[in-house]
Amino acid sequence: MKAIQVARYGQAEALQLQEVPDLEPNDDQVLINVAGSGINPIDWKILSGAMQQYIPLPLPYTPGVEVSGTVAAVGKNVSDFVVGDQVFGFIGIVGGYATQAVSTADRLAHIPATLPLQQAGGVPAAALTAWQALHEHAAIQAGQKVLIHGGAGGVGSFAIQLAHLAGAYVIATSSAKNHEYLRSLGADEVIDYSATPFEEVVHDVDFVLDTMGGDTQDRSWGVLKPGGQLVTLVYLPPGAEETAAARGVRATLIGTRPDPAQLRELAALIDAGQIRPMVNVVRPLSETRQVQDLSQTGHARGQLVLRVGDD
């Protein structure tokens, strides 16, 4: 099999396409012939070495948290899938940038019937993150006002659609070139972060989804109404929870977890046309470095996917 290998932490030049031994599933695993693998910020954050303290990995490792593909073999304890099934899932913290991947069955679901197999590889991580932020942590309700930072990114693109579907009033930040794109997803207001400080025009928000951290997070506290909540995917600095409490709001740092029931629900929404994955870039496995570099700019629109099966 072919796999991207990381032998040392660093930047994209550490990503090497190599031949490695084929995988074999254990009794509880599914072996997948990978068709597509999404590239996500967590991948390059791990690659940089900045997360070694929290996610220690033996080197070399294969990046990639999500895949889509066809089931090639199943362990004896697996009953939910059979050889030939087309599946997608948030498979773990590594392993996706390869022609084969293994996953436990409780991280997988059948792909949406209306979605091309390769494109499905860019759905699980971003869609689950948006779903869990909005529905589990924020308990979003119709009529609420939400602010989504980085609306054009993978998580933001799903979050706008899911918040709109829930009946919320959606405000999103992005560069000017993405405004029509975000409105097409359901954003009611779009703010050009380079031209207008969002805190000057946004007030009394029930929920902020922070995909940026840093100064953007700092300036978000003041736009929340009393009892509101900021959910961040990035980082809560020391003292952030005290800052939030002093303002009468809440702060939550979340991590995404695999959930096949949620994946099935998301697949049903995709098939019903109620949400649509916005897969923007599909490149071969041999171009992993270039796609990772694009992800790291923070200016990519929608999901970025490695085309694995045809490489």
Image (tube, grey):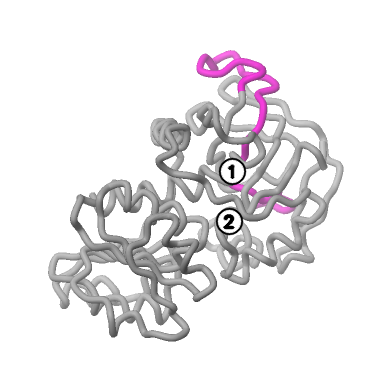
The residue where tag 2 is placed is: 40
Q: Amino acid at mark 2?
A: Asn
Residue 137 point in image, percent of width and height: 28, 52
Residue 202 point in image, percent of width and height: 27, 76
Helix, strand, or loop for circle 2? loop
| Displayed quadrant of residue 8 | bottom right
Residue shown at 40% from the left, 40% from the top: 274
> Could you say which is closer to the camera, residue 54 or residue 36?
36
**Residues shaded magenta:** 56-85
Q: Amino acid at mark 1?
A: Glu
Q: CB under 8 Å between callouts 1 and 2? A: yes
105 in relation to 200, above or below: above
Q: Is residue 29 left or right of residue 134?
A: right
131 in relation to 242, above or below: above
Residue 11 point in image, percent of width and height: 71, 68
Going by the picture, which residue comes out furthest to the right?
19
Q: Is residue 7 left or right of residue 278?
A: right
Q: What is the quadrant of the C terminus in the image?
A: top right
Residue shown at 54% from the left, 72% from the top: 177
Helix, strand, or loop for circle 1? strand
The residue where tag 1 is placed is: 66
| Displayed quadrant of residue 22 | top right
84 in relation to 181, above or below: above
Q: CA distance from mark 1 to mark 2?
A: 9 Å
